[in-house]
Image: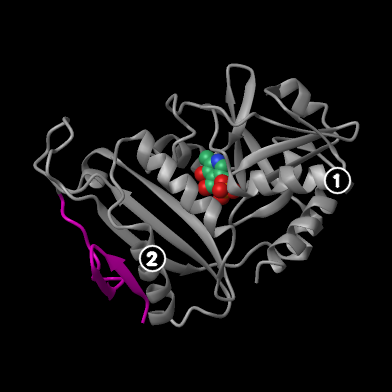
């Protein structure tokens, strides 16, 4: 049976619930993380917990437990779900807690902590070589995209449009600047140079993005962390997306335009596979 952790209890997932007055439900007043659990190892665990702490700090939400307790709960959830083999997403959500509805932060409320484990299938090598379709979509999100907030409505609307167009992802465009995807970061390659949006308040600084940048540096691929335009994407030699669940995923179509899956994307895919395997 799949068990979820909710505020101190391990419960059958279908019975697990939070109050209707949880501020996550009322206001999307919370943050989350998604970590890849591969054969019992949490990939890039430290980087995910670092980002979780940062997101909480940016919203002035307290850690609901000590870091040590959070780690114990995580490993207990893995043990109780017999999840030591295969690929799972560990989902962690922390909200400001339960309080009578009021926009002001409640004073003596404990943050809510929810964790779930869900099986998933990372893209296969055949999918990597084939590449995926993405579409262009306006970025209508708030000005603090660097916080991994649970307020994902604009992301959901964009991802839904992509799904309706038979695409894997929506490439979000703010003015003329490409920021990222609705659930992933975006990279382009032009004349051997790897280009991605800088990690400012316009994007979520992906843990996978950081790993890719470090691997690219090791492979002596030239990197430019800078804003780029839709025109540059149209003229790019390669496009790929990155996230915890997609890894390094080449793009073979942007709207109606076909793109060849490129050498640098495949090289970084292979390097990322090795990087992940080295942690397991
Ligand atoms: N950008 C957005 C908007 C995301 O939602 C995600 C992942 O959920 C990412 C980027 C990629 O982040 P990570 O590589 O840490 O999964």
In the displayed image of the protein, which residue is found farthest to the top?
175
Q: Residue at x 48, y 32 (%)?
A: 145
Quarter holding residue 66 = bottom left
- Is 209 left, or right, of 6 in this rendering? right
- The answer to which of 174 and 227 lies nearer the viewer is 227
Q: Position of residue 217 (x, y in %)?
A: 80, 42
Q: Which colour scheme is used?
A: one colour
Q: Residue at x 74, y 57 (%)?
A: 272
Mark 1 and mark 2 in contact? Answer it, CB < 8 Å: no
Neighbours of disc 2 within 10 Å: few (<14), some (14-19), many (20+): many
Q: Is residue 1 visible?
A: yes
Mark toward the start of the polypeptide (1 vs 2): 2
Q: Can residue 163 be seen in this view?
A: no
- When the figure is inspected, residue 194 is found, relative to residue 17, above or below; the finding is above
- When the figure is inspected, residue 36 is found, relative to residue 142, above or below; the finding is below
- In terms of secondary structure, what is the magenta stretch mainly? loop
Magenta stretch, residue numbers: 1-20
The quadrant of the image that shows the N terminus is bottom left
Q: Is residue 13 magenta?
A: yes
Q: Position of residue 267 (x, y in %)?
A: 85, 52
**Residue pointed to by mark 1:** 264
Q: Is mark 2 on a helix, strand or loop?
A: strand
- Is 122 left, or right, of 217 in this rendering? left
Neighbours of disc 1 within 10 Å: few (<14), some (14-19), many (20+): many
- When the figure is inspected, residue 201 is found, relative to residue 55, above or below; the finding is above
**Residue pointed to by mark 2:** 116
- Is 165 left, or right, of 251 in this rendering? left
Q: Position of residue 38 (x, y in %)?
A: 59, 70
Q: Where is residue 168 in the image (x, y as percent from the top left)?
A: 62, 48
């Amino acid at each position: 049976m799949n068990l979820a952790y909710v505020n101190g209890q391990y419960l059958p997932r279908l019975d697990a619930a939070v109050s209707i007055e949880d501020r996550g439900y009322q206001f999307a007043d919370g943050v989350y993380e998604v970590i890849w659990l591969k054969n019992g190892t949490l990939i890039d665990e430290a980087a995910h917990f670092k980002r979780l702490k940062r997101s909480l700090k940016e919203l002035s939400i307290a850690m609901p437990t000590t870091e040590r307790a959070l780690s114990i709960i995580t490993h207990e959830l893995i043990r109780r779900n017999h999840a030591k083999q295969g690929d799972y997403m560990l989902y962690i959500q922390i909200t400001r807690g339960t309080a009578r509805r009021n926009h002001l932060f409640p004073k003596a409320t404990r943050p809510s902590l929810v964790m779930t484990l869900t099986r998933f299938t990372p893209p296969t090598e055949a999918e990597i070589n084939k590449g995926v379709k993405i579409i262009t979509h306006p970025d209508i999100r708030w000005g603090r995209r660097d916080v991994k907030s649970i307020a994902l409505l604009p992301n959901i609307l964009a991802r839904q449009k992509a799904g309706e167009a038979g695409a894997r992802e929506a490439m979000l465009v703010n003015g003329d600047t490409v920021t990222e995807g609705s659930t992933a970061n975006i990279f382009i390659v032009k004349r051997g140079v790897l280009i991605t949006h800088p990690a400012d308040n316009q994007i979520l600084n992906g843990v996978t993005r950081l790993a890719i940048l470090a691997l690219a540096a090791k492979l002596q691929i030239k990197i430019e962390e800078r804003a780029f335009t839709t025109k540059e994407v149209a003229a790019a030699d390669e496009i790929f997306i990155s996230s915890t669940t997609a890894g390094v995923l080449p793009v073979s179509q942007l709207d109606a335009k076909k793109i060849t899956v490129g050498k640098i994307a495949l090289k970084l895919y292979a390097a990322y596979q090795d990087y992940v395997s080295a942690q397991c």
